[in-house]
Amino acid sequence: MLNQHKVQIKLDLCQWKQANYDESEPEMQEGVLTFSNVSSFQIEPPSFLITSNEILEVKVQDENMSIEIILTGTDDVGKVSIVAQDIFWEGC
């Protein structure tokens, strides 16, 4: 949906891997992370294929409204960088 300046990423989050996980909660949480009013979207390296990757690190910079997501790949590590006005999470 590039023409709408929107990026959507479907995620399956492993809650049980989080330090603050409560065993009464589901182990997995599915949802869609929606970035709106996107002014920049980059995947590095450009050949990096986003499939069933594990998130290694997330960096948020409030001053320039950017987020950087570091992902594992089959043979390498990739980076998704997004600059957006708003971010919304919607569980499935």
Image (tube, rainbow, N blue to C red):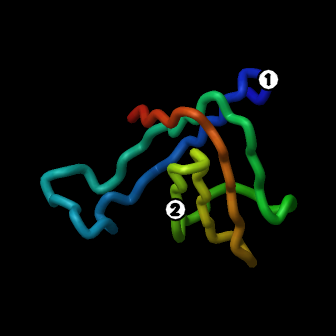
Instruction: Decide which of 62, 47 is in the foreground and name it.
Output: 62
**Residue 52, percent across and down?**
61, 58
User: Is 61 left, or right, of 46 in this rendering?
Assistant: left
Q: Residue at x 42, y 43 (%)?
A: 30
Q: Which residue is mark 2?
A: 58
| Position of 72 relative to 8 (above/below) | below
What distance separates the C-alpha of mark 2 from that of mark 1? 26 Å
Q: Residue at x 59, y 42 (%)?
A: 9
| Position of 3 relative to 86 (above/below) | above
Instruction: Decide which of 68, 33 is in the foreground and name it.
Output: 68
Q: Residue furthest bottom?
A: 75
Q: Which mark is residue 3?
A: 1
**Residue 17, percent across and down?**
33, 68
Q: Residue furthest right?
A: 47
The quadrant of the rendering that contains the C terminus is top left
Q: Amino acid at mark 1?
A: Asn
Q: Amino acid at mark 2?
A: Val
The quadrant of the rendering that contains the N terminus is top right
Q: Which mark is residue 52?
A: none
Q: Secondary structure at mark 2?
A: strand
Q: Residue at x 66, y 44 (%)?
A: 83
Instruction: Decide which of 42, 71 is in the foreground and name it.
Output: 42
